[in-house]
Image (cartoon, rainbow, N blue to C red):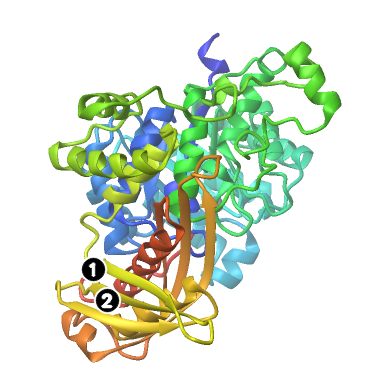
Amino acid sequence: MSSNDRVLIFDTTLRDGEQSPGISLNGSEKLEIAQQLARLGVDVIEAGFPIASPGDFAAVRTIAQEVEGPIICGLARAQPGDIARAGEALANAERPRIHTFISTSDIHIEHQMRNTRADVLAGTRAAVSQARELVEDVQFSPMDATRSDPEFTAEVLQIAIECGATTINVPDTVGYATPDEYGAFLTKLYDLTPGLKDVTLSVHCHDDLGLAVANSLAGVLAGARQVEGAINGIGERAGNTSLEEFVMLLDTRAKLLGLHTGVTTQEIARTSRMISRMTGYPVQPNKAIVGRNAFSHESGIHQDGVLKNPETFEIMDPRKVGLDDSNQLVLGKLSGRAALKDAFEKMGYQLTGDQLATAFKRFKEIADRKKQVTAMDLEALVTDDLRSEGVGTTFELVSFDVTSTSAGTPSSTVTIALPDGTEKTGHGSGDGTVDSVFMAINEAAGVEARLREYRVEAISGGQDAIGHVSTVVELGKVGAALRSQIPGVIAGERATGTGTAVDTDVITASAHAYLRGLAAALRELDHSDEPAAAAEPMR
Ligand code: KIV
Ligand code: ZN
């Protein structure tokens, strides 16, 4: 195929995706996801928004330094401080890209930015020129493009191209366009913007009306050769284009469309499950490509047909997205540390000595309790253990004991280690066992906190499946003992944090997930490493 048939995949799971409500990934989780995205073969990873917080900056910098293969991109508003910060975060990337944006719709210009069209033209010129002084690869987006005047948008794009932008991304920021409309809008921009044919046109669609993938397809049919999106379609509000859906659309309908991507489709299922687990965002069972029912047939007629010939009711082979015939990621028999190391390497994880020792210990615990350990189990265990390393404030679960009062109410005694290592014990009773464990943790930590969300899922099938627990914990009052250990906590503020954990025992996983949620909320409250005025978060 000629290069004009190749569609670049720009992954924004770690930027637009990470800005979804309730998702807060730490630095090591972001790095792990970026490494998996590189194995998946995306062309560009938008690793974050460096000016937004010191954590975002550090994550972009680490990903730029460590992840090989894709272009690493950082987002920046069309403001000098944002662009300088993005350039700094990307300084060590092999292939850095700065993505700068400014709104072009009158509604945003008048009511959000409170400036004028002339300011937008000047801002674009200054931002793209500054970014080009820092990196060669600059992407420019006119935010809310689909509600903007096409003539004015074209004027802005022409300036961006003349100042050196190499990719022009046209976002349907509010997910309002229909496919025909979006395609026609892009065609009009090609007509009105002389330089557009010389750069890569990109599409970025939100899913408010469920049209993100359809609009992205309309975009490539109109000439775009970069598609932006996120794994599992996560992102602002209803989310972004689901990259796995878009990639499999081009792959499955290659004869009709004549377009292809560089994605290793066999990595899709693993990537989707990793992101679901780390973000705590479940994938709906009937979701295209990555839902657990996407390749299952329930009705007898369908099952009968598929047994006779899979093509009767299947348009894709599950192996194409990395699942075996029973829709599982299964490993062969594993015995010994060397075999485990080998299995991890095949899955793309290079574990160091200590990490391998921890993983092996956890593997043995699980293998004693489970008949078959799947690749997903292993991945869940290893990411669960590694992700708590190096995140700053954490609590450790030392022990817990669950009993029942004479009235039959569950009650628990839990001992935890506070961030400085001091052990504290608390008691609690509640509506159920899990609730009583959480109450006991609150007492031990000396906090007022409540569970906002709680979800348990099985990582793989069967009665002995590993349970994956996600929590969203809201933290209110922090007691004096804890406050003295974390002086950056501002009394009276509230914060929420997400925590996830896996174990064959759901109560143990719940206790770990609650402690991680609590620690994440506490880190949110800790302002000690923040500059005086942090940037206002934007998308
Ligand atoms: O949706 C949007 O407009 C964005 C921009 C930053 C590209 O996410
Ligand atoms: Zn967006």
The residue sitting at 16% across, 37% down in the picture is: 352
Q: Is residue 81 above or below residue 375?
A: below
Viewer-proximal residue among 164 and 396: 396
**SS for tag 1?**
loop
How far separated are the C-alphas under marks 1 and 2?
9 Å
Determine whether the beta carbon of the residue marked 1 sits less than 8 angstroms from the nearest atom of ligand 1: no
Task: Choose top left, top right, bottom left or bottom right for residue 170.
Answer: top right
The answer to whether mark 1 and mark 2 are in CB contact below 8 A is yes
Which residue is tagged 2? Answer: 526
In this picture, is 183 found above or below 508?
A: above
Which of the two discs, 1 and 2, sits closer to the camera? 1
Q: Residue at x 43, y 41 (%)?
A: 139
Q: Amino acid at mark 2?
A: Asp
Q: Which mark is residue 393?
A: 1
Work out whether residue 230 or residue 373 is closer to the camera in this orientation and state it. 373
Q: What residue do we see at 71% from left, 41% from top?
A: 182
Q: Horizontal placement of 173 versus 489: left or right?
A: right
Q: Residues within 10 Å of mark 1 (few under 14, many from 20)?
A: some
Q: Quadrant of residue 367?
A: top left
Q: Secondary structure at mark 2?
A: loop
Graded by Cα atoms within 10 Å as few (under 14), some (14 to 19) or many (20 or more), the crowding at tag 2 reads: some
Q: Residue at x 30, y 40 (%)?
A: 363
Residue 280, x across and y down, in percent: 49, 56
Q: Is mark 2 within 8 Å of ligand 1?
A: no
